[in-house]
Image (cartoon, coloured by chain):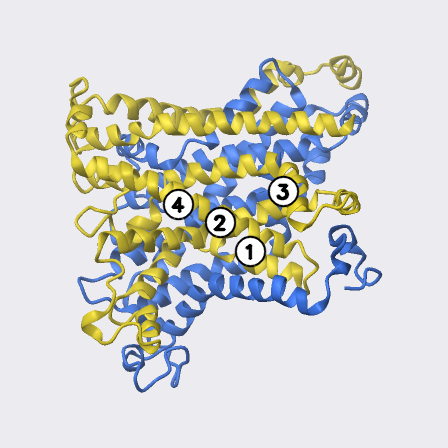
Amino acid sequence: MSIAIATRKQAHPTSLARLLENRTVLSVLFMLPAATILLVFLTYPLGLGIWMGFTDARIGRPGIFIGLENYFSLFDDDIFWLSVFNTVFYTVVATIAKFGLGLWLALLLNHAVPFKAFIRAIVLLPYIVPTVLSALAFWWIYDSNFGIISWLLEQMGLVQDRLHYIDFLGVPWHARWSLIVANVWRGIPFVAICLLAGLQTISPSLYEAAALDGANAWQRFRYVTVPMLMPILAVVLTFSVLFTFTDFQLVYAITKGGPLNTTHLMATLAFQRAIPGGDLGQGAAISTAMIPFLVVATLFSYYGLQRRKWQQGARDD
Amino acid sequence: MTEAVRPALADSTGMTYLDRLPRRVVTVYIPLALFLIILLFPFYWMGVTTFKPNDELYNYSDHNPFWIDSPTLQNIRKLLFETDYPQWLLNTMTIAVCATALSIFASVLAAYAITRLRFRGAQTIGLLIFLAYLVPPSILFIPLSILVYGMGIFDTNWALILTYPTFLIPFCTWLLMGYFRSIPYELEECALIDGATRIQILWKITLPLAVPGLISAGIFAFTLSWNEFIYALAFLSSTEQKTVPVGVLTELVEGDLYHWGSLMAGALLGSLPVVIFYSFFVEHYVSSLTGAVKE
């Protein structure tokens, strides 16, 4: 139809103009920039990375196919297994803490507090600021000699003198917990603001109805808030798990995997082996080993989205 | 809280009028204050350290660590005049602006095609773009570094301008698809009947109506590019090419003796542009953050 009109307005429409009104041609043209960039810089490297995991590529030398050798050597590699343990531990603990505290903060912000918009804006700051730069601040806060935590502990009489200061980043378990605290600090705002958006869609009349039926505060939370929040919680959880599992910046900035490679995550270990170490093949193998987990997280997200659609449909009926 | 004065909040207050003030202080205000203190403390600490002279920095017995007795600009001066910091700022700004512009351009066209032209397979493409968002940079940087090297753009701004869209385009497209869907289809039909071409419709009708979405996507893309670290660390090597996060971490940390004053000054100055930018568009930022999750 549009072509007919174009013909009426212009006696001799150029073939180019007619081509631009063809939906298929136009679709291809419109998809072209995004598709080119994503195919060249995302899909191709994804495949290349998996392939490189099966080669002995080093910096400046394309590798030859060596089968599963990289994976066999990783299988006997204690540092690799420690990094897998660290990644899982880091993800599980940090995610639980982020969601517990984030949900609490969202519930607090959902109250009628003064300066709500301002507070909400401030709360997001840890998420806005470049992670590496706030990680540097944490590094300084954790400093064992001049760090502020050491000073506070001394003031409270918990440590006596310099010699007994807690070395936050120098002992493996201290360092792991310090990293988790920094990650939780950075992750709370994202979780809280997303869940707050979810909370605001819950109609107050549901709470009133529950209260009239005799539900106490805990029951209102458990049987009204949680089920209503579930769809958005599932999506935020997936994103959070995904980004925590593949985290790189915080660990690289604060401990660089130290002391003695005990706090490496899979991402930082892959970097260390591939770029400074030069062993691109093995680094790619470590990265590839992260993919199965990501697939599981994605499927989880997909079903979370599905359930949300179903719930929206059910509510409209 | 009086409902009449704050009608905007009325829908979210619900039964809170039942809470008495002392109860609210314990259950809401005190925990909220603690949250704010903990969330903001690292920034306060960054600021305090930046303006402290070195003798105060390491001497807690004569000076209260939480306050500055004689503020100094020495750390900032050292940063601006004795390091490549201004160059890093310029690099980061250039890369963030170019990567954002490129991503928004590609995303607008893709989102319009998926939601409005409805070609065959548009649904599948939409889902694939969402999946692309879930591919983290941590598993792409090794093969990408080979690719970047092979294209001859290693250690240039282009290495980042072309790779940042891999995570910006999926996000922006997904966000803009939501905005485009909210624009009534009838508007475009009217324009079609009046003889407008598809490109005119996109340029003169859809885009002006989607300005809030464009701003949201732009701000988010800008902050994401400003904060990116792993690609910048892997694809840049010379000092004068680095971005702020990489430069501060790799160039200002010298040996075992950390110059916390200038490090914190670097962190503070590197954070300020995004924070200022963010403060102008908080609402857009929040809506893009939550919109992308709810979509």
Q: Mark 1 and mark 4 in contact? Answer it, CB < 8 Å.
A: no
Residue found at x 34% / y 50% = A250
Subunit of mark 1? B
Q: Which residue is mark 1?
A: B278
Closer to the observer: label 2 or label 3? 3
User: Please, what is the three-letter code of the amino acid marked with disc 3?
Assistant: Arg
User: Please, what is the three-letter code of the amino acid marked with disc 1?
Assistant: Tyr
What secondary structure is found at the residue carrying circle 3? Answer: helix
Relative vertical location of residue B25 with respect to residue B178 in this rendering, above or below: below
The picture quadrant where one finds residue A222 is top right
Q: Mark 4 and mark 2 in contact? Answer it, CB < 8 Å.
A: no
Subunit of mark 4? A
What secondary structure is found at the residue carrying circle 2? Answer: helix
Looking at the picture, tell me which residue is in the foreground, A270 or A58: A270
Closer to the observer: label 1 or label 3? 3
Supply the letter of whichever chain is blue: B
The numbered dot on residue A222 is 3
Q: Which residue is mark 2?
A: B223
What secondary structure is found at the residue carrying circle 1? Answer: helix
Whether discs 4 and 2 lie on one chain: the answer is: no
Q: CA distance from mark 1 to mark 4?
A: 30 Å
The picture quadrant where one finds residue B143 is top left
User: Please, what is the three-letter code of the amino acid marked with disc 2?
Assistant: Thr
**In the displayed structure image, the side of residue B143 where residue B111 appears, left or right:** right
Residue found at x 79% / y 54% = B10
Supply the letter of whichever chain is yellow: A
